[in-house]
Each structure stands twice: as C-alpha cells, then as structure tokens.
Image (tube, helix red, strand yellow):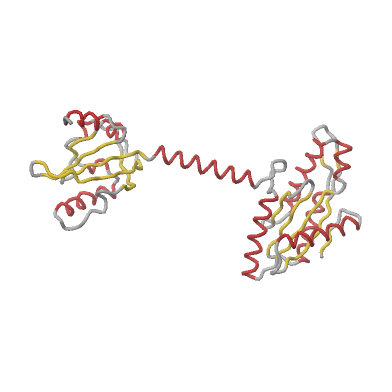
Amino acid sequence: MPSSLMCSLVDESLDAVLIIDEDCIVRYANQSMQNLSGYSGEELVGKSLDALLPGAMASCHTGFVRTFTRGEAPSAVLGKVREFAIRDRNGIVIPIEMKAIDIGQHEGRRYFGAFIEDLRPRRTMEAQNAALLARLEQEAMTDPLTGIANRRAFAAEGDHMLVRARRSGAPVVVGIADIDHFKKINDENGHPAGDTVLRAVAQRMTEAARASDFVARIGGEEFGLLFPDTHADAAVGIAQRIRESVAASPIETDDGRLVHATISIGLTQISPAEQLDDGLATADCALYNAKNGGRNRVESI
C-alpha cells in the first residue's frame, strides 16, 4: 500500500496521533492531536514534548525515555493502554487514554508513537450514568407519596442494623405506627385529603425522631420505626414524642379542611437471635394492644 495512503489515514484518524524521537522532540501530530492540544502542527513539530505534559510529568518524562533508549531500564508504558494527562495550549489538564509504541529507528534515531483518546466525554458519560443509577436506586428505596424511606429500604436498614447490633451487643428496638381511623379520614374527606394526612404524618414523625432513628412508610397507613442502640424504655419515650408531634395540631388539606390525626405505636426490643420479621410480628402485637387500649398511645412488649 502506498505510504501516502497510510499518511492520509493517520492524518484523518479520529484518535489523536503523536510521534516523538528519542530526545522527546515532537516529529508529527495529526489534526486530531492539534485539535485536542490547541496547538497547530507548526507549533508542535520540533518542540519538546514537555510543552504538552503537566508539570510533575514533564520534569521526569524525558529522563524515562532516555533511560529506556540506552537500555538501562524497561519501559512501563510501551505496548500498554494507560491513562495519563496532557496540558493543552490554555494550561488545561486533559485526562487521556494512550497506547504508546516503539516504531523503530530511522536514519540513526529512534522514534515512538502514541494513539491518544480524550477521556473527558467518557468521564462525563460515566458521571451521568453514575448519577442516574444513584437516582434510580434512591427512587427504588423511597416512598413516592411521602418522600421518606419505603418498605424495601426499611428491610435493608433493619437487617444492617441488626448485623451491627449482633457484633456490638447494642440493643435495637423496632416499632410499627399506624394512623388511627385512617379509613374514616379518607371516607369523610376524600383520598386527596388522605394523601395530605399521610405526607404530614410522615414529616412530623421524621422531625420528631432522632437523627439516628429510621422512619419508613411500610404499608398504606403504616410506618416502620427503628431505634438503634436503644433499650425498650428509652424507645418508649422517643415514640411518645413522635406520637405527640403528630397529634399536636390539625393537618390542613389543600381545600382548607382541618383534619385531626393521631397514631398508635407498638414497640419491641429485638433479641440478638431474632430476625427483623420476628421483631415486626411482635411489634404488630404491641400495636394491636395500643389500638385496643384506646388508640393514640404507645405500647411495648
């Protein structure tokens, strides 16, 4: 194949192509390399490669090349795909992926070539994908109506909390809270008002809980509670504060109605041998006692 065709192919390559000699002097830069660096071909050819390298790399790169060409040390770069960085005409450091090759000798001088890819588009895409994945994961763990954690998040947090508790011996209390007479609230005020009540109750509960506590919506009008490093007696006190915060004032709906809402809470301290579902079953029994005891109250088993 004629060399002119090969030159045309390299000249038009989307990858940046650079050739230097054994003294790290630039001998060729294709159009993509010129576009990437911001330098014209005339500005690059004949100049030291150091002009394209960040300060720390520029100070040692030439020495590495000369050590290799003298046969004093193997190259850690040639023939490998590596991530590096170059500095463009404006001093901006650009992350790149590079494959450098030894292209041999010509007229007594040794030459090295490199295929260079700008990593910024890939990094941007990776960051966007990571952000999208994080958002999807967050949405999968969030109740869409109230904006607090959902049952899936509650189960995951409960399992993690119990694993830590088994290692440390610290107590964990699990609870279930239920909005009293919620069906009546819906029937008398409509489902939009019921949704407003759910959102307001969720907000009041999370605000009244400690930062270390975990509150989630685990069912229609049911909320799960986790109290780490907390004995049953202390958890009752925190639950009473949560209950009081919900009952403290009526909730105003979008159409201006005032709805009085209260919650009943059942609690239990989980033993090290129990699973989260075991604790929830016992807490549900305590909730049943709270409902039968008149509602708007906290019961512990």
Q: Locate residue 301 relative to residue 46 in the image: left or right.
A: right
Foreground of the two, 88 or 292? 292
Q: Locate residue 125 relative to residue 150 in the image: left or right.
A: left
Query: Which residue lies most toward the front here?
Result: 1
Q: Where is residue 168 in the image (x, y as percent from the top left)?
A: 63, 70
| Residue 301 picture quarter | bottom right
Q: Locate residue 227 relative to residue 179 in the image: left or right.
A: left
Foreground of the two, 89 or 169? 169
268 shown above or below 110 = below
Q: Where is residue 187 in the image (x, y as percent from the top left)?
A: 88, 38
Task: Count the marks.
Answer: 0
Query: Quadrant where the N terminus lies?
Result: top left
Residue at (66, 45) in percent of width and height: 142
Q: Locate residue 248 relative to residue 157 in the image: left or right.
A: right
73 shown above or below 199 = below
Residue at (68, 65) in percent of width and height: 229
| Residue 11 picture quarter | top left
Query: Which residue lies most toward the left here?
Result: 107
Query: Which residue lies most toward the bottom here?
Result: 169
Q: Where is residue 116 in the image (x, y as percent from the top left)?
A: 30, 40
Residue at (19, 41) in percent of width and height: 20
217 shown above or below 30 = below
Foreground of the two, 14 or 171? 14
Q: Where is residue 283 in the image (x, y as percent from the top left)?
A: 79, 60
